[in-house]
């Protein structure tokens, strides 16, 4: 389901993040935030990826805690890869670590200090009212336009006949380049059917950089030759 905002935060900032969400939703802005919006017994990584893909904007509640959070970094990485705009809402006067600075250096920042937090949240809401343009999330496409398109149907492959062992090797190659979200992406790609080459080409756009994509495809070709 599409929504206006994905809110990324670290656990120590939960109170500030949910105060922000409450005020945003009171303004009629639709928000996705974990763990509230993660379905029971769902694949957590899958839910995060799908929520990022269907958002219009990511709000990053930025602090010293989020600076050190591996989960926040992975969410920011996926947003940048999907070309999803990110608005860091800085609740502490800290600078991003090198790992986050790489992704956030070109983003517009909004400071939310000194205390109290509420006037800064109101200012953010006013900004978002203008930025989002009053368009409801349900009017948007459910996939971000930069998401890889499904591979064309191949009438010679009807069963998605890549065995579990080769899927694990494919996941390993992809994980070397994009991290632990690879498992979900491989499972989702396999649902569309096709042989190993079709799956590899379906997954390659998830990798940043033409050279890395080429290396990945060559590795997948070698996996196929080893059948």
Image (tube, helix red, strand yellow):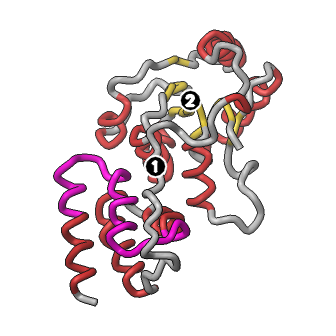
At x 46%, y 67%, the residue is 186
Residue with the most extreme right position: 26
- In the displayed structure, 29 sits above or below 189; it is above
**Front residue of this view, candidates 191 and 37:** 191
Residue 85 visible, this angle:
yes
Q: Is residue 97 magenta?
A: no
Residue at image mark 2: 57
Query: Where is residue 218 shown, x and y percent of the image?
Result: 19, 68
- In the displayed structure, 195 sits above or below 177; it is below
Q: Is residue 131 left or right of residue 73?
A: right
Query: Where is residue 103 shown, x and y percent of the image?
Result: 35, 35
Q: Is residue 44 left or right of residue 148?
A: right
**Front residue of this view, candidates 68 and 81:** 81
> Range of the magenta residues?
190-216
- Give SS at disc 2: strand
- Give SS at disc 1: loop
At x 36%, y 39%, the residue is 100
- Number of the label disc, if any, that sits on residue 149: 1
At x 48%, y 29%, the residue is 86
Nearer to us: label 1 or label 2: 1
Query: Where is residue 195 shown, x and y percent of the image?
Result: 39, 75
At x 57%, y 40%, the residue is 8
Q: Is residue 196 magenta?
A: yes
């Amino acid at each position: 389901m599409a929504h206006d905002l994905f809110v990324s935060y670290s656990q120590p900032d939960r109170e500030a993040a949910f105060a922000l969400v409450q005020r945003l939703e009171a303004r009629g802005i639709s928000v996705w935030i974990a763990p509230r919006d993660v379905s029971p017994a769902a694949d957590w990584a899958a839910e995060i990826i799908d929520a990022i893909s269907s958002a219009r904007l990511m709000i990053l509640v930025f602090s010293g805690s989020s600076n050190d959070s591996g989960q926040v970094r992975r969410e920011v990485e996926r947003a940048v890869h999907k070309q999803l705009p990110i608005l860091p809402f800085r609740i502490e006067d800290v600078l991003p670590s090198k790992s986050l600075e790489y992704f956030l250096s070109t983003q517009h920042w909004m400071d939310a200090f000194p205390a109290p937090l509420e006037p800064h949240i109101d200012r953010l809401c006013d900004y978002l009212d203008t930025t989002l343009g009053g368009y409801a999330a349900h009017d948007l496409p459910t996939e971000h336009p930069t998401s890889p398109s499904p591979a064309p149907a191949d009438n010679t492959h009807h069963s998605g006949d890549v065995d579990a062992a080769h899927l694990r090797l494919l996941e390993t190659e992809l994980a070397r380049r994009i991290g632990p979200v690879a498992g979900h992406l491989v499972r989702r790609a396999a649902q569309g059917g096709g042989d190993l080459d079709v799956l590899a080409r379906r997954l390659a756009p998830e990798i940043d950089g033409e050279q890395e994509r080429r290396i990945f495809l060559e590795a997948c070709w070698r996996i196929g030759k080893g059948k």
